[in-house]
Image (tube, helix red, strand yellow):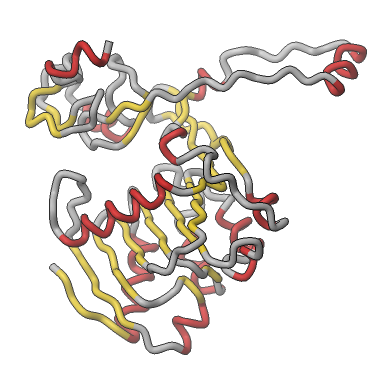
Amino acid sequence: MSKFITGKELSEAVDTIIWKAKEEILLVSPYIKLDAHFKELFEKQRHNHKLHILLIFGKNEGRVDKSFNKTDIDYFKQFPNISIIYVPNLHAKYYANEKMGVVTSINLYDYSFKNNIEFGVLYENKLLSKFTGNNDNEVWNTCKDLAEANAVVYINRPMYADYDDYRSSKVLLDLTEALYKGQAVPKSGKKLADFEDELDFDKVYSEMPTRQSEQKQTAAAYSPKPVAEKTFVPGYCIRTGVKIPFNPKAPLCHDAYKSWAQFKNEDFKEKYCHYSGEASNGETSVRRPILRKNWNKAH
């Protein structure tokens, strides 16, 4: 269902999207400036590790502080599960959560909400899936494609032990200092798909650090050894379709696992293929998380 909105109704729709989000907030705006009201809304979500914020901003290449000041980007860097993407030629504006979204003329900028005449189209009762074809899904998927194709400047991810035991978050990438010094973000750099949606706490801290002698530490300071990065192999949650590490022995994201663990039926019919992410129409399960046609490719 779609609805034309403006004025107070538009402002309240954006507020509701932020306040009531449970799984994901998608913020697409060339210009971002948070006033006290916006920060009150976001503060509810600031410690919510289950909520992923995907923030896409743009314009003013070389002077990004004109689009998104450093104080506000530092505020967003406090969130435990967030991806920040920079798109130099971005002009579109879209705000959404897993239930509703609004395509609009308004920037996420306090002045715009207080002073400008702005329009928008509100979509509600969203079914976020790349396999469905309503208009809001088209907007959602277009923004996701935009995020995956452009430069990642900041990634923070939650760490879990045993699926649902949240421990803390870990910054996987931070290029914001270089960005605010006017340095261009390399277009050939890492993309969103290169990062896991969540981290295994026990794997991150699998090796206990050992104390080096002072002599070795000094030598290391002048001759650092490159650390090989582990390649992320993407898989998909067989219940929700979200991207997770590929592991046929653990084919559920932590939220889906909590639901599955109530009954622990390994043969319960699920929705997606763990290997490809495509709809499985009930042909996958925890026991058999990969579609038969993909079995050889997955091994």
Location of residue 219 by image quarter: top right
Q: Position of residue 176 (x, y in %)?
A: 64, 51
Instruction: Kindly identify the residue that appears in the image at 42 percent across and 69 percent down.
Output: 91
Instruction: Kindly identify the residue that appears in the image at 31 percent across and 19 percent down.
Output: 250
Q: Position of residue 262 (x, y in %)?
A: 21, 27
Give 221 or 47, whichever is nearer the viewer: 221
Q: Is residue 212 left or right of residue 111?
A: right
Q: Is residue 79 above or below residue 37?
A: above
Instruction: Kindly identify the residue that appears in the image at 41 percent across and 62 percent down.
Output: 28
How many labels sit on residues? 0
Instruction: Kindly identify the residue that appears in the image at 51 percent across and 62 percent down.
Output: 58
- Which quadrant holds the N terminus? bottom left
Location of residue 65 by image quarter: bottom right
Give 289 or 132, whichever is nearer the viewer: 132
Location of residue 244 by image quarter: top left
Q: Is residue 202 above or below residue 159?
A: above
Q: Is residue 2 above or below residue 171?
A: below
Q: Is residue 130 left or right of residue 213?
A: left
Q: Is residue 220 visible?
A: yes
Q: Position of residue 25 (x, y in %)?
A: 38, 55
- Which quadrant holds the C terminus? top left
Give 89 or 112, whichever is nearer the viewer: 89
Q: Is residue 261 visible?
A: no
Q: Is residue 260 left or right of residue 193?
A: left
Q: Position of residue 109 (x, y in %)?
A: 50, 75
